[in-house]
Image (cartoon, coloured by chain):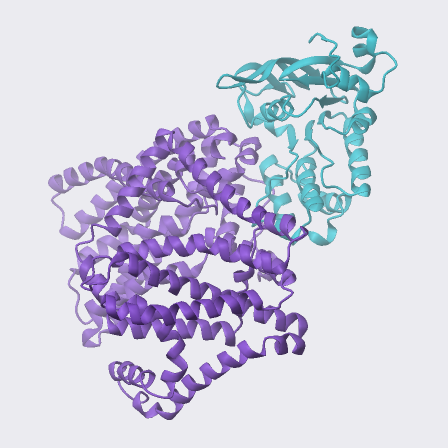
Chain colours: A purple, B cyan
Amino acid sequence: MKALFYLTWTSARNRFLGAFRRVRSPRYAAALIVGSLYIWSFLFRSPNRGATADFLLGRPSQTLITLLMVLTLAGAWVFGADVTALAFSQAEVSMLFPAPLSRRQLIGLKLFRAQIAVLINTLIWVFVLRRGGNLLPSPLRAVSLWILFSTLNLHRLGAALVQAAWKQHGRIGARRNRYSIAAFAFIGLFIVAGLVVHRSSYLGRGIGEFFSGLSDVLSSEPATIGLYPFHLIVAPTFARSIAEWRWAVLPAFGMFLLHFLWVMRTDAAFEDAAIEASAERARRVEAFRGRRSFGTITGPKTERSTFRLAAKGHPALAILWKNMLCLRRTVQLRLFIGPMAMAIAFGAAVASAGGDTAGFVSVTAATFALMMVVFGGRLIRNDLRHDMLHLPMLKSLPVAPSHVVFAEVASAALPMAALQFVLVVISYFASLLAERQPIPASIRLAVVVASPIAVLAINGALITVQNGMAVLFPAWVRLGSGVSTGVEALGQNVLAMMANLVTLGIALVPPMIVAWTSVLLLNASRGLSLAFVLIVASIVLAIETYGAMRFLGRALNRVEPLQTI
Amino acid sequence: MISAQGLTKLYGDFTAVRNVTFDVAPGEVLGLVGPNGAGKTTSLRCLAGIITPTNGTITIAGHTLDDDPIAAKRALAFIPDEPHLFEYLSVEEHLRFIARMYGVPDVDERLPVLLGEMELNDKGLSLPGELSRGMRQKLAIACGLLHEPSALILDEPLTGLDPAGMRRMRATIAARAARGAAVILSSHLLNLVEELCSKLLVLRQGACVAYGTMDEIIVAHPELSGLSLEDVFLSLTGETGSSSGAEAP
């Protein structure tokens, strides 16, 4: 057991020392300062923090959190526990599993490791809640939160162990764990019985009455009998006085001890399940790391058709082809749901109140196009931000580096521009059918006429700036699907975003000057002037972007693989 | 065909490769050997145009890498020890991508032959993530050989291959050399080097400690006469503490 503590201790110490050594570098030091300021402003400087804490510690929140806890844990029992609760790292699997250690010792290691996350979570929430209107001192709040998080963690692990035993040993495994299975079956039975018996209290009512009715049902028998253990666990966290806390903390600690004994005494040959879980966790980590744009890759076997690359032609087009396949196979459409939902909400708020469907479509499409200008570059990353990890291969190819940059930028800019153009066109034609339109027809026509070149220029510039960061400051940009964690990584992200905005702002100055000059000089009608100005400004921006890409080509030629690692 | 004159690569104060000079003629196979950290991979990466030498000139098929990098790279294939593949392209798509890059017009004819040679016939639609380590290595090799390079640089090419694959790879390297390709082969497998290479370049701490045919090396170091290649290697690199202090060309 000492070896396991040693492993945990040295891992944590080395991680801390590694982070400390990195801070000696000005780059990491600056990032750490910015990241710390960001967290500080989030945790300590929020103007409504007291009100937020009051809300979070109120009785409605207590009921909601209890219910969420029940649903989460019930989901683990009904639909299968989260197998990653049993996961070890690959190194732990290969070194600890063959070692002369008992299962109980391995589970002990899992629990010990989990305490690091539990303590960090406890600390964060104590800070978040420390200035609420309640009178509970922070140390007591910390104890309550520690009991809550530890018990939840134990329950998650216990459920996974019971299911692993059931899966591996069938009826025998289930029989060994019959008491715990029966206990949770009874809890579920009381809650379901309450929901069925009092269903008239919440069904067939408005949304507000539904929730208040549901809350009443869960606060009365027989559901309260099933929910009682959960209330015991959360009660100290929501105590509003020291006296109340004293009454609540002992039963909660009792629940924690009960869970601890349950987990430690669960007889499950969990090694196979743990190895499966470790592989599953590794897959999830990969998916999480690629959450912004790269998920599970869909192979060509599952595609209906793949556009084939001709053997002859400019080699740089092969990079474009490759990156289009990358986009097609890895883009996660769910990432677009957020911006789309916001666009729909805005469209509904602006246009559909009077039942104007065409107006709703027009506003929604235009809003979504604008949101894609803002967020598109972060969602579609099939360019150098991904290919810098393949730098050795890219550099060994017989293609001029500037052509590589052109192709890489085009790979992300073209699909974004195409999507935005389609949205602008939809918005325009929908606006023709709308009952009322706040924007004059000539302006709308000017925008749609200028949009093909405008969206190309804007997206080209946006993507060039982001690719430029990847080439010039590869250590500051998230490359590929990898993601770094920690305060300094957060600071790096903030700094990189600021640098992007500043560069783009500077790049937009010449087009703005040209546009303004054109407006002053032109005597044509308003719509025509706007179309002309947009096109001229786009051309200026495109020329600037071309120069930037040439420069990046030379920079790419100089950058060496070691710098990206 | 492949020439390096005074090749030097510095990383800050650290000298990874120091003033290395060698030539590989068409049909020759140069074995690049040395202990870990001797500068082999750095040298190969310089030759492939992946990293820029601090000093020295590299010429591939008559084209200087500094002056005409695209023509030089078009004649070259670099097969690294760790296959660098695009995780979202299938086996066949990798080969089509490389064909377009290097201008291989008859890719449709070459593709099945090469896939057969590498035993990847039924893996054309598979993604790299679905392939074993050995198959990924075979795909990297197929990508390198597709455009019939006149200069071939291989860094530990047998890593991950099964015995049949190793035998086939040895035959492939010998066949490419017989057809006039200049080959540089870096490997710790000294029997492979002994079997295939006509010349040796031994690196130690970034510097060349021996260069030439085995006979030339023995002439320069008579004390190594009668020793096996392994003993010669250990002696030249000082691994046994009996460094010969061989002179670089």
Report the side of B82 relative to A179 (left or right).
right
- Pick the residue in front: A506 or A184: A184
Classify residue A397 by image quadrant.
top right
Q: Nearer the viewer, residue A105 or A510?
A: A105
Q: Position of residue A168 (x, y in %)?
A: 66, 70
- Does residue B75 show up? yes
| A551, above or below A100, in the image | above
In the depicted view, which residue is nearer to us: A314 or A323? A323
Vertical relation: B142 (above or below) B189: below
Q: Position of residue A41 (x, y in %)?
A: 23, 48
Q: Residue at x 65, y 61 (%)?
A: A272
Q: Residue at x 32, y 50 (%)?
A: A452
In the image, what residue occupies the spot 51% across and 39% down? A389
A311 over B124 or under it: above or below: above
B30 or A32: nearer the viewer: A32
Q: Taking A178 as reference, is B34 above or below it?
A: above
Residue A352: x %, y % from top left: 22, 72
Q: Is residue A478 left or right of residue B136?
A: left
Q: Where on the picture, by quarter, is residue A542? A: top left
Q: Is residue A281 visible?
A: no
Name the side, left or right, on which B211 lies relative to A373.
right
User: Going 58% across and 37% down the picture, which residue do you hit?
Assistant: B101
Question: At which x and y percent is residue A5?
Answer: 53, 48
- Which image quadrant for residue A108? bottom right
| A228 sits to left or right of A40 | right
Name, please, the residue furthest toward the right.
Answer: B226
Total numbered labels placed on residues in the image = 0
